[in-house]
């Protein structure tokens, strides 16, 4: 098989746990066209013609995430793409002390709940996971659901091991609103895998905002 990719590109992919199989050849398509086609084909990454910005173009970087971000300049973009495509539990968690709602993705709900409490995630230590659904593309689902939530978002930094953590996105909304945003586009298959936890108590998380 003749390779589309250079030896350097193949080595780069291997270092990050990917192979040529994961790359969609989108060299002759528009950015939007190849993003849609790659998704359809179930490929995490795309091969673009070389029309990147300054440094990228000079270096001849062609490997991108589906969203078009160079993974050779910034390998952390790979982790982002992987998170987008990984199966997992998308959850709604609530904090009574902060009167806030968090939508997130995890492979292990108990662990995540304990972590959020121990870290004082977003400035709260009383997080409770109120709802979850198991989906095939965790990150992507989370992002879509989160963007459908009506109400304001807040970004809060917090300290973990004495180090200020990046801002986390939280919703100023009721549990019911987050639930609506999360469940309105579920497939029948996904509906079978949803769980509302501690349903007796979810009424306490119906925060009201102007
Ligand atoms: Zn680059």
Image: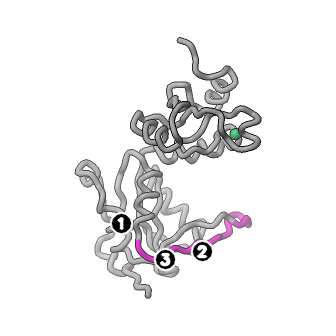
* Displayed-image quarter of ligand 1: top right
User: Which residue is found at the position 68% from the left and 37% from the top?
Assistant: 72
Q: Is mark 3 within 8 Å of ligand 1?
A: no
Question: Can you give x and y, in whole percent of width and height, for residue 47 in the image?
Answer: 57, 32
Q: Which residue is mark 1?
A: 181
Q: Eyeballing the image, is 177 above or below 139?
A: below
User: Which residue is found at the position 53% from the left and 31% from the top?
Assistant: 28
Q: Magenta segment: does it hold 4?
A: no
Q: Earlier in the sequence, mark 3 or mark 2?
A: 2
Q: Eyeballing the image, is 21 above or below 115?
A: above
Q: Magenta segment: does it hold 151?
A: yes
Label 3, label 2: how far apart the Cα atoms are = 17 Å
SS state under label 3: strand
Along the line of sight, which residue is nearer the eye, 39 or 111? 39
Q: Earlier in the sequence, mark 1 or mark 2?
A: 2
Q: Is mark 2 within 8 Å of ligand 1?
A: no
Question: Can you give x and y, in whole percent of width and height, for residue 125 in the image?
Answer: 55, 73
User: Which residue is found at the position 31% from the left and 62% from the top?
Assistant: 183
Disc assigned to residue 123: 2
Span of residues in magenta: 150-164
Disc assigned to residue 173: none
Q: Earlier in the sequence, mark 3 or mark 1?
A: 3
Label 3, label 1: how far apart the Cα atoms are = 14 Å
Question: Can you give x and y, in whole percent of width and height, for residue 68 in the image?
Answer: 57, 44
Q: Tell me if 46 is positioned left or right of 110 in this view.
A: right
Query: Which mark lies nearer to you, 1 or 2?
Result: 1
> Which residue is farthest top?
1
SS state under label 2: helix
Q: Which residue is mark 3?
A: 152
Question: Can you give x and y, in whole percent of width and height, for residue 4 in the image?
Answer: 58, 21
Query: Which mark lies nearer to you, 3 or 2?
Result: 3
């Amino acid at each position: 098989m003749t390779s589309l990719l250079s030896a350097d590109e193949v080595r780069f992919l291997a270092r990050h746990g990917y192979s040529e199989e994961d790359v969609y050849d989108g060299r002759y398509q528009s950015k939007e066209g190849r993003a849609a086609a790659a998704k359809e084909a179930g490929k995490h990454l795309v091969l673009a013609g070389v029309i990147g910005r300054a440094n990228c173009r000079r270096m001849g970087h062609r490997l991108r995430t589906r969203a078009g971000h160079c993974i050779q300049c910034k390998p952390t973009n790979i982790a982002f793409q992987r998170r987008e495509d990984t199966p997992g539990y998308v959850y709604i968690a609530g904090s009574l002390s902060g009167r806030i709602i968090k939508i997130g993705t995890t492979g292990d709900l108990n662990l995540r709940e304990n972590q959020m409490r121990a870290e004082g995630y977003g400035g709260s230590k009383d997080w409770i996971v109120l709802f979850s659904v198991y989906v095939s593309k965790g990150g992507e689902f989370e992002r879509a659901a989160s963007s459908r939530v009506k109400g304001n978002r807040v970004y809060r930094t917090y300290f973990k091991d004495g180090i200020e953590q990046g801002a986390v996105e939280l919703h100023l909304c009721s549990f019911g609103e987050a639930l609506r945003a999360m469940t309105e586009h579920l497939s029948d298959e996904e509906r079978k895998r949803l769980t509302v936890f501690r349903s007796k108590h979810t009424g306490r998380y119906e925060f009201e905002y102007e």
